[in-house]
Image (spheres, rainbow, N blue to C red):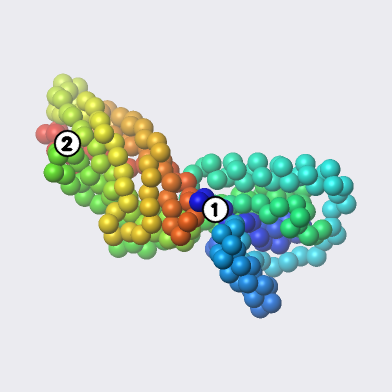
Amino acid sequence: MKQALYIGVLLGTVMLAGCSAKEETNAQTKSDEAAKVLANEQTNEHRPVPTNAVVETKSPLPLTQEQKEAYHKQYEEMVNQANETKIGINLGVPSIEEFEPEDWAEPEEYEQRIQEHIDSFLASEREALGNLSSSKSEVVRGSNGEMKKTAYLYVSDKVFSVEVSGEFDTQFSGYRKGQVFSKVDQITSHIASSSSGEWKQTFSEAKLIDNGRTYSLLIEGVYTLNRIATKKAFTVEFSCDEFGMIH
């Protein structure tokens, strides 16, 4: 069952949340959000992100019900677009009934808060992957001759690894004065044995770069952990040297 995290940060009149938000919040807010998380886990509903932002006092927008419905639809479209970037972020919009008067925001402000959340997520991703002792892996040959490489990915504050494999052919190039790639087949990926969760590949695309010496493979899939499914896209490169050795 695919689940999305609600955006829950109150900043101005918009309610958006970042898993990596650094600002303070009061103890009562944390207690209320923890209760909501527990209740939603028990009912298999969307799980809200804890509120972690300084709240500014602003007058509620004077919106009619029709305007609220129009704004809410725009909010959902913005969040859907953010999720479709497939960077590993999972956002959702609360229902109209869950919005408090002070939670409504102009679409431009709501979009800005979404972007701030994305920027915060990407910064956390860079930090998490940068803290790995080694985020690069060597190419190994499988039992059927396929070449395999491990990619390290970040989703919802968790690093996991996916093993990507493909069958590569090379040929001599007079221009490069050595071997270059001629084709790749059977591009597959699966969750590494050292990681928890499930990975299902949904798309792959191979692009030759470096004058035929490198294949850049775009992999897209869905990572599922604790019944929360998140779309993720990443690239991994396989290169060959003048002798046809793949690394």
Q: Which mark is residue 3?
A: 1
Whether residue 108 appears in this view of the structure is: no
Name the residue at 33% across, 54% down. Answer: 161
The mark that comes first in sequence, 2 or 1, is 1
SS type, badge 2: loop
Name the residue at 87% across, 47% down. Answer: 64
Name the residue at 52% across, 42% down. Answer: 85
| Residue 167 screen position, x and y as percent | 21, 34
**Residue 82 to residue 42: above or below:** above
Name the kind of residue labelled 1 in the image: Gln
Closer to the camera, 246 or 229?
A: 229
Name the residue at 21% across, 29% down. Answer: 181
Q: How many marks overall?
A: 2
Residue at the top extreme of this rendering: 174
Labels 2 and 1 touching (C-beta < 8 A):
no
Which quadrant of the figure has residue 210?
top left
Instruction: Tell me: 189 left or right of 115.
Output: left
Residue at the left extreme of this rendering: 243
**Mark 2 or 1: the one toward you:** 1
**Residue 50 to residue 177: above or below:** below
Whether residue 179 appears in this view of the structure is: yes
| Residue 148 screen position, x and y as percent | 22, 44
| Residue 246 screen position, x and y as percent | 18, 39
Instruction: Tell me: 209 left or right of 64.
Output: left
Which quadrant of the figure has residue 38?
bottom right
Q: Which mark is residue 241?
A: 2
